[in-house]
Image (cartoon, helix red, strand yellow):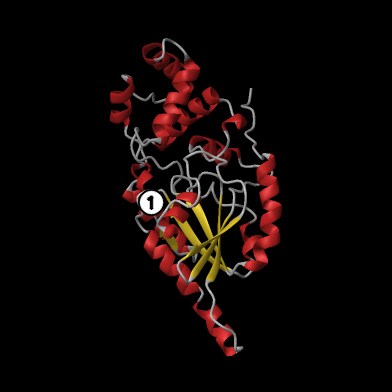
Amino acid sequence: MSSPTIQWYPGHIAKAEKQLSKNLDKVDLIIEVRDARIPLATSHPRLKRWTNGKEHLLVINRRDMISIEARMAWDQWFRQKGQVPWWCDAKSGIGVQQIQEAAIRSGKELNERRLKRGMQKRPVRALILGFPNVGKSALINRLVRKKVVDSARKAGVTRTLRWIRVGQRLDLLDAPGVLPPRIDNQHAALCLALCDDIGQAAYDVEIVAISFLKLLISLKYKTAAGVNSKLIKQRYGFPLVEETSDTHNWLTTVAEKHTSGNTSRMAQRLLDDYRKNLLGLIALELP
């Protein structure tokens, strides 16, 4: 019996996407934010349509949540594809200044063209775009150097478009997280669920936790993935099993020890522990 599909496209996202389409002509630059743990799963299939010849800045947030080896592997992969990734940790501010400088530089040609036409210089207008909960609001707050938008590590906090000024040379359009109306790649959907980049109403916690354990087993011997079997055993008292067929029994056994046999609570704890980096710096995707 196959697992139920993971789909999530709430009304506020559909509404935001319509607003987004109406405002694309007003921006010069698209700053796309992805999650370092899952940089492919957080790539929107409509990105090329939205950029449509505009400058594109690829920002990969939460660099602190994966190993250096994983970051280096992805950095090389993106550069081979002709993209320059800008790595940051919006929560601490690491890499944010470089992103601001890159965004302002992208507007140099824009203002040169304006001056040739006898027009005044103006700030670069940049759209902050990405999936829910990839850290867009945290990045904006760091760029502005104060809290101007609500930020939380859960999906669906930002619900409307809003212009925000960053100094005299950069204006940002903050948009709600956008998702494709249908997620055909269910492995990508699983990754979104594990990283809390999709609403919890979209999935069964126990099924996702068991799938997470199977994914850990598949990544166990890939050094860059950062799966730390010793840390998992230390935290739960039982080592990570070798066979994916044993993951349900593992969850049941661990639940008996930590949550009086409540597998749903244990499944939620497992996911929360991963999201808080309590299981180590684990990259769910590798190039």
Question: For the image shown, how many numbered marks are present on the structure?
Answer: 1
The residue drawn where x is 64% and y is 67% is 26
Q: Is residue 120 left or right of residue 70?
A: right
On screen, residue 61 above or below 170? above
Q: Residue 275 in the image: x percent, y percent?
A: 42, 35
Q: Residue 40 in the image: x percent, y percent?
A: 52, 49
On screen, residue 59 above or below 102? above
The amino acid marked with disc number 1 is: Asp
Q: Residue 262 in the image: x percent, y percent?
A: 47, 13
Quickly name the residue at label 1.
Answer: 89
On screen, residue 98 above or below 205? below
Q: Quadrant of residue 56?
A: bottom right
Q: Is residue 203 left or right of residue 100?
A: right
The residue drawn where x is 34% and y is 33% is 278
- The quarter of the image holding the N terminus is top right
The residue drawn where x is 65% and y is 55% is 46
On screen, residue 169 above or below 280? below
* Element class at badge 1: loop
Residue 66 in sight in this render: no
Q: Quadrant of residue 251?
A: top left
The residue drawn where x is 61% and y is 46% is 159
Q: Is residue 60 left or right of residue 226?
A: right
Q: Nearer the viewer, residue 48 or 121?
A: 121
Q: Quadrant of residue 246?
A: top left
Q: Residue 261 in the image: x percent, y percent?
A: 44, 11
